[in-house]
Structure formats: C-alpha cells, structure tokens
Amino acid sequence: MSTAATDWKLQMRLSNKLNPYFLIMPGFLVSALIILWPLGQLGLLSVSDVNRFGQVKDFGGIENFARVFADPVLYESAWRTLIWTVGVVVGTFVLALPISISLNEDFYGRGLARVLIMLPWAISLAMLAIVGRWALNGESGTVNLMLQSIGLIDENIAWLARAETAFPMQILLGVIATVPFTTTIFLGGLSSIPSDIYEAARIEGASNLQMLRRITIPLMRPFINIAIVLNTIYVFNSFPIIWATTQGGPVNSTDILVTYLYKLAFRFGRVGEAAVLSLIMFAILLVCTIIYVRLAMREENA
C-alpha cells in the first residue's frame, strides 16, 4: 500500500473522530456563553463588596460566604427546599403514573380527558398560584366552602396564615402544576411499549399489578429518569407558587432557597450574599443531577 493511501486513510479516521466534536462545538459555545459567563459574574460578585444596585465597590474576600453560612435562615430554607422538592416530585410521580396509564387506554372521550389534564400546564405558574391563594382564602375561599358543605370542618381555616397548613398546600399546588408535564412524558413512554407484550402476559395469567411491576415500570425507566431529573431541577428552582401565595411568610416559615435568594437580592439589597447563595444552589443541583444520571446509566448498562 502506498504512502499516499495510508496517509489518506489516517486523515479519514482522524476526521471521523473529530467530526462529532465539530458538530457539537456551536452548541457548546452557546451554552458556555449562556451558563459560564453568568457563573463567572456570580463568582465575581460573591467575593466583592456590592451595593444594593449591583455596583461592585471593593474586593470583599470571603465575608459574603461567612455571612451566608452564619445565617440560620439558610439552613431552614435548605431543609424546607428538600421537603418541597421531594414532596412535589414524589407526589407528581404517584399521581402522573396512574393518570397516564388510564389516558393510554382506548375509551370514549379520551381526547377530552387528555385536554383537561393538560389545562394546568396551559396557564402560568403565577396565575395558578393566584387562583390557589384565592381558593385557600381563610374567609371566602372555595376550599373552606366545599369542606363545610360536606361536613368535614365546622369553621373557616386560614390555610395560608400558618406554616403547618400553608406549606402542605403549596406542595399540593406544586403537584397540580407538575402533573401535566410528567403525564405527557409518561404517555410518550407508554406509547413506545408494544401491546403484544401485554397480550402475551395476559395469556400467561399475569394480573394488572404484575404487568405494572414487571413490564410497564421497567420499560418506562428511561422516561421516569428523565421526568425525575427535569422535575427536580424545575421544582428546586420554582419561585412563583411560594412567592405568590405567602412570599415566604409568615415569618420566613415557608421560605425555600429561591425565595430566600430573592429577598437577599431585591428586598434586603445584599447582592453579594445573593450571589453566594446562587452558587450554592447551582452546585447542589449539579451534584444531584450528576449522581442521579450516573446511577441511571449504571442501571441501564447492568
């Protein structure tokens, strides 16, 4: 074989190896501009003395970090964020799976049922939160009226005035807002499962619960993984429901990290500390996402 032919083959192999990188380079550069540049700016603000208008006055070192980690509200908000995220994500999964299985069946009015389940997704989170605040009003809310009409309560309950009732109601609103998106993902997964598998399982005498455990959930695992990762990121950063219903009150008792961040930056003017909290939240989400994706990939390769 001639030297020219050998060189040509080597160039083709090198080109085939490099082509994927050239193809993803534009997307990588855009992502770097959108993600890395703001992160760099946050890093600069986090170690600077910044006034309430965002103007850097001087280098502040790690003072902003020390003040944030010394604030007990940070740890209370972090714990509440964990409860909020797990509560909404798990509650959404528990509701979305049976709903999607039901909507995947062939029945009269299925199209209308799918439209109705998607309605909460069609309106903004802020509007959903405002409607929820009106429904949970302690004087004339529809929730109190409905519960009184069926005899479950004797007097009005101020749902959003106390942390022990406000936070569970906010989690419920979060579940209502997240179910349509998750149901859509699950319906896509269910439509990809061949119906012959279920027919063969029924012939073998498998019950509906056995088919759910042995067929549906294992085959839908990639879609479940996607829904969990996306919902975790989405719910962790979700701001409108908490803010529009209680603004983190009463007395910071329903604050999560994102509302605490908003208060630091725009209510208290502590921009440097808000930048520190932004970096902390980014790091938490990045670590959780990497761990979960690695575990999911390990299960798929097993």
Image (spheres, rainbow, N blue to C red):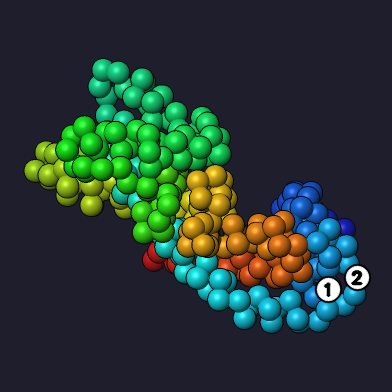
Decide which of 164, 6 is in the foreground and name it: 164
Q: Is residue 240 left or right of residue 167?
A: right
Quadrant where the C terminus lies?
Answer: bottom left
Residue drawn at x 27%, y 24% is 106
Decide which of 277, 131 is in the foreground and name it: 131
Instruction: Please give the residue where the numbered disc 2 appears in the rendered image.
Output: 57
Residue 284 appears in the figure: yes
**Place of residue 241 in the rendered image (x, y in percent of width and height, measured from the top left):** 51, 46
The amino acid type of the residue labelled 2 equals Lys
Residue drawn at x 42%, y 63% is 83
**Of circles 2 and 1, which is in front?**
2
**Place of residue 141 in the rendered image (x, y in percent of width and height, measured from the top left):** 37, 35
Q: Is residue 141 left or right of residue 291?
A: left
**Place of residue 19 in the rendered image (x, y in percent of width and height, measured from the top left):** 75, 52
Quadrant where the N terminus lies?
Answer: bottom right
Looking at the image, which residue sits at the far left? 205
Local secondary structure at mark 1: strand
Instruction: Please give the residue where the numbered disc 1 appears in the rendered image.
Output: 48
Mark 2 packing: few (<14 Cα in 10 Å), some, or many (20+)? few
Mark 1 packing: few (<14 Cα in 10 Å), some, or many (20+)? many
Which quadrant would residue 199 be assigned to in this image? top left
**Which callout, 2 or 1, points at the residue further toward the start of the chain?**
1
Decide which of 145, 78 is in the foreground and name it: 145
Decide which of 107, 122 is in the foreground and name it: 122
Q: Are marks 2 and 1 in contact (CB under 8 Å)?
A: yes
**Place of residue 76 in the rendered image (x, y in percent of width and height, measured from the top left):** 50, 70
Local secondary structure at mark 2: strand
